[in-house]
Image (cartoon, helix red, strand yellow):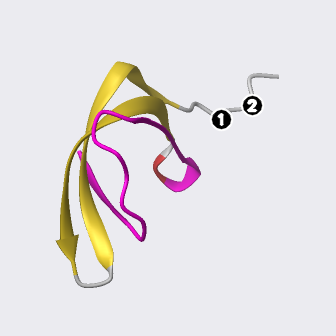
Amino acid sequence: MSVSVPDKLELRSFVHINCPPLKLNGNASVRRQLQQGANYTTGLEFVGGLFYIDQRDDS
């Protein structure tokens, strides 16, 4: 997966992804970065899995 971020990140550093609109949550390692204008396209590899946030009310 790749994301666009405004800051350069260290390769092999770990980041946490939490995206409620897509209902995704997980940890990832930075695998590559490519500067495109003022932002960086960052390639991520998820470690320990990527989780779907199920926000249904089961009551």
Task: Name the quadrant of the N terminus.
Answer: top left
Q: Which amino acid is tagged 2?
A: Asp
Q: 53 or 49: which is nearer to us?
A: 49
Is residue 10 rendered magenta in the image?
Answer: yes
Dividing the picture into quarters, in which one does residue 47 lie?
A: top left
Whether tag 2 and tag 1 are in contact, CB under 8 A, the answer is yes
Per the image, label 1 sits on a secondary structure element best described as loop
Q: Residue at x 38, y 35 (%)?
A: 13
Residue 49 lies left or right of residue 55; in this view the side is left
Q: Residue at x 56, y 32 (%)?
A: 53
Q: Residue furthest front?
A: 10
Q: Which residue is mark 2?
A: 57
Residue 58 lies left or right of residue 18; in this view the side is right
Judge whether 35 appears above or below 56 on screen: below
Judge whether 47 appears above or below 11 on screen: above
Residue 38 lies left or right of residue 1; in this view the side is right
Question: What residue span does the magenta drawing correspond to?
Answer: 1-21
Q: 54 or 24: which is nearer to us?
A: 24
Q: Which residue is mark 1?
A: 55
Is the residue marked by circle 2 packed among few (<14), some (14-19), or many (20+) residues within 10 Å?
A: few
Is residue 27 rendered magenta in the image?
Answer: no
